[in-house]
Amino acid sequence: MLVGDAAHGTALHIGQGASLAIEDVIVLVELLKRNLPVENTLNQFMQERFEWSRLIVENYDQLVRWELDAWKGNMQKEVNITDLVNETLAEMSRIIISKLSTL
Ligand SMILES: Cc1cc2nc3c(=O)[nH]c(=O)nc-3n(C[C@H](O)[C@H](O)[C@H](O)COP(=O)(O)OP(=O)(O)OC[C@H]3O[C@@H](n4cnc5c(N)ncnc54)[C@H](O)[C@@H]3O)c2cc1C
């Protein structure tokens, strides 16, 4: 089983990699405390972590690609970095609120 950068490395200047790694471990420890069969633990871990990690890794990878394009002078006119940042933060908020509502 992989956690942290081994599972979902992100661009370092995004400032999310350590957070993701720590969150992975907290979720894993909480699941292990339940003494479930290993397969259930791993499946629940994926359910808890996959979508959140995918959202951050994919969206911030896109931002880094755009930053590289801008640096090379190849930025497409239709690219809107602010929109992607706002959409990512809105989706992160939606996921957090939905998790809080289940507590
Ligand atoms: C310059 C820089 C700035 C960053 N800034 C931020 C930030 O502001 N905010 C943020 O959230 N994240 C930041 N990150 C990313 C963050 O550091 C990583 O996402 C985080 O450290 C990942 O933790 P990890 O435990 O998964 O991996 P790591 O911290 O890489 O730990 C893996 C450990 O495994 C060890 N290891 C490797 N192979 C073996 C082996 N075969 N046997 C035994 N041990 C082994 C390594 O030596 C290492 O100690 C930054 C990264 C860099 C490089």
Image: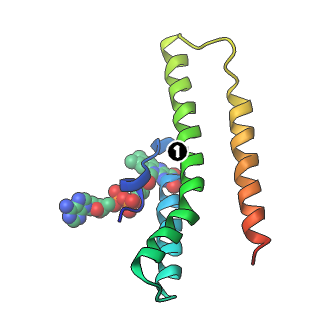
* Quarter containing the C terminus: bottom right
Q: Which of the two residues, 24 or 67, is positioned nearer the viewer here?
A: 24
Question: Percent position (x, y) of residue 43?
Answer: 49, 68
Which residue is the site of mark 1? Answer: 57
Q: Horizontal placement of 2 versus 72: left or right?
A: left
Q: Horizontal placement of 87 versus 64: left or right?
A: right
Q: Which of the two residues, 81 or 7, is positioned nearer the viewer here?
A: 7
The colour scheme used to paint the residues is rainbow
Question: Percent position (x, y) of residue 94?
Answer: 76, 55
Q: Which of the two residues, 1 or 4, is positioned nearer the viewer here?
A: 1
The residue depicted at 54 percent of the width and 40 percent of the height is: 58
Q: Where is residue 79, by image quadrant? A: top right
The residue depicted at 69 percent of the width and 37 percent of the height is: 85
Crowd rating for badge 1 (residues with CA inside 10 Å; few <14, some 14–19, many 20+) = many
Question: Percent position (x, y) of residue 26?
Answer: 52, 74
The residue depicted at 69 percent of the width and 43 percent of the height is: 88
Local secondary structure at mark 1: helix
Q: Which of the two residues, 73 or 27, is positioned nearer the viewer here?
A: 27
* Identity, as a three-letter code, of the amino acid under mark 1: Val
Please say if 42 is above or below 38. Answer: above
Please say if 101 is above or below 83. Answer: below
